[in-house]
Amino acid sequence: MTMQNNAIEIAKVLSEKKARDITVINIAEKSSFADFFINATAGSERQLSALLDFAEDKAAELGLEEKSVEGLHGSGWVLVDLGDIIINLFTAETRDKYTLDKIWSDCETIYIEEQREKDEIYER
């Protein structure tokens, strides 16, 4: 499985667990520290913590090694470093403040949306 497929699989789990505005951004050509960002918004700090657990479980299932986790305990932003994949989980206010999607807007972005009966994935 490719790193992009791994990133999409993690993003799908976040979607199933009701994260919002989920993007998988291919930063490989613009970055030396990772190939993909997964950005997702949680409805609350409590949901952010739960999403972290689900993302970590899926990453482990995919055989991805967790390098570090930053930003726990009420910060509004948790970053999970999986090497080639960086997961950014935000509260809405924090995501709006840091605008990572806008900063990396010149990169290929895959949008993942939960719909009532199926996940829809599309690229921009």
Image (tube, grey):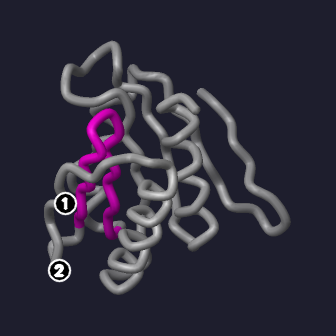
Name the image quarter holding residue 71: bottom left
Out of 62 and 99, give the one closest to the viewer.
Answer: 62
Out of 111 and 57, give the one closest to the viewer.
Answer: 57
Provide the secondary structure element on which disc 1 rests.
strand
Provide the secondary structure element on which disc 2 rests.
loop
| Badge 2: residue crowd in 10 Å (few <14, some 14–19, many ≥20) | few
**Image location (x, y in percent) of residue 26:** 43, 27
- Residue at 50% x, 57% y is 61
Is-magenta flag for residue 2? Answer: no
**Image location (x, y in percent) of residue 68:** 17, 55
Q: To which residue does mark 1 refer?
A: 69
Out of 124 and 68, give the one closest to the viewer.
Answer: 68
Is residue 88 placed above or below 51 in the rendered structure? above
Numbered mark located on residue 25 in the image: none
Please give the range of residues in magenta.
Answer: 77-91
| Residue type, mark 2 in image | Gly
Numbered mark located on residue 74 in the image: 2
User: How many badges with numbers are in the image?
Assistant: 2
The N terminus, quarter of image:
top right
| Residue type, mark 1 in image | Val
Name the image quarter holding residue 50: bottom left
The C terminus, quarter of image:
top right
- Residue at 24% x, 63% y is 78
Side of 41 where 117 appears, left or right: right
- Residue at 32% x, 33% y is 84
| Helix, strand or loop: magenta stretch | strand
